[in-house]
Image: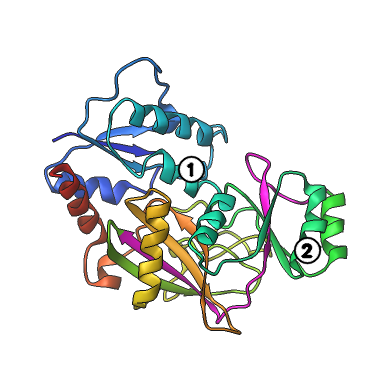
Amino acid sequence: MKIGFLHEHPTWSDALIDCFAQNGIEPVLINIAETPFATDAPAFDVDLCVNRINIMPSHGRAPAVAAHTLHFLNWLEGSGTKVINGFQAHFAGASKAVQNGIFAGLDLDHPTAIAIYRPEDAPAAAERIGFPVIVKPNIGGSGSGIARFEDSDELQAAVENGDLDLGIDGTGLVQEYIQSDGFVYRVEVLGDELFYGIRQRIVENQFNYCAADGCSISLEGSPSEAEFDFCSLDSAGRIEPHEVPDGVLQNVLKICRAAGAEVGGVEYFIRAESGSACFYDFNPYSNFVGEGKALFGFSPEQRFVDFVKAHLSD
């Protein structure tokens, strides 16, 4: 039994890798940031690959690793290797515009958004949507680069001052700001089953809802409006289990199927005015909440390992 384990972030998968070892499985570790590959060579000698590569390059990684990852996953699958969360899922996870398209295609409530690549197009897009808006990179993670704008003057000033961050590939979204019930909700699934559901209380003008230990947000000093303090390293009591309504779960499963993901997490708000679920983010790998066993009553890592082992017997 040979399992390839694709990763990039230096710490996010340590506990999961240890859990594989406790189950008698020593995965072949493939750090994408250190993996050139011959495009005419056969695939790695593994039975299955698990993609746990972080979409947003972690600290110290060149942004080009994001494109390198997509090339590698496409090559790996084309070489005949089965991948849990392969190229299609990773591409969907790397593009906020693609995600919004998936939500729209499934006729699900989602924030109105306009994709841009020139900062000077942001004011006109915002006028079409209506203020307040947020502007965020198309490829992003842990809330990086997201900013809220209350009116056209504020946004125009940001454009003129060069303050809009469109991320590592220079593309982004101008998006409706959702007035919510005060929480952000996350649903994780493994295959066709619920993995877990959590919620976190929203802090005004903060946008990071990272549930994983080891996220790259700095915890030093006071957060500014463009920074976030939801990292579980400093969020005792903020992350809490949440019972997922069946209708929401079925929609999350549809989203993951449409994205080509066997494993995934979907985040949503509850609109304050209507009480409906408004889906806004898809993540093609599971974020393991710190102290998950105490939080959920089971080991998330063990359940993930069991899911992968079942795939080996398919």
- Secondary element under disc 1, as helix, strand or loop, is helix
**Residue 84: where, in percent of width, then height?**
30, 44
- Name the image quarter holding the C terminus: top left
The magenta stretch is 162-189
Residue 216 shown left or right of residue 37 in the figure: right
The magenta stretch spans residue 190: no
Amino acid type, callout 2: Arg
Point 16% across, 47% down: residue: 309
Nearer the camera: disc 1 or disc 2: 2
Q: Position of residue 256 (x, y in %)?
A: 39, 56
Q: Is residue 8 visible in this depiction of the protein?
A: no
Residue 78: x %, y % from top left: 35, 27
Query: As shown in the figure, which amino acid type bears the numbered disc 1?
Result: Phe
Q: For residue 182, which quarter of the picture?
A: bottom right
Disc on res. 91: 1
Figure quadrant of residue 221: bottom right
Disc number for residue 129: none
Depth order, front residue of 204/174: 174
> Which residue is the site of mark 2?
128
Percent x, y of residue 270: 52, 77
Q: Which residue is depicted at the point 88% across and 64% down? A: 153
Q: Is residue 165 magenta?
A: yes
Question: Is residue 150 visible from the viewing direction of this image?
Answer: yes
Pointer 2 local density, CA inside 10 Å: few below 14, some 14–19, many at least 20: few
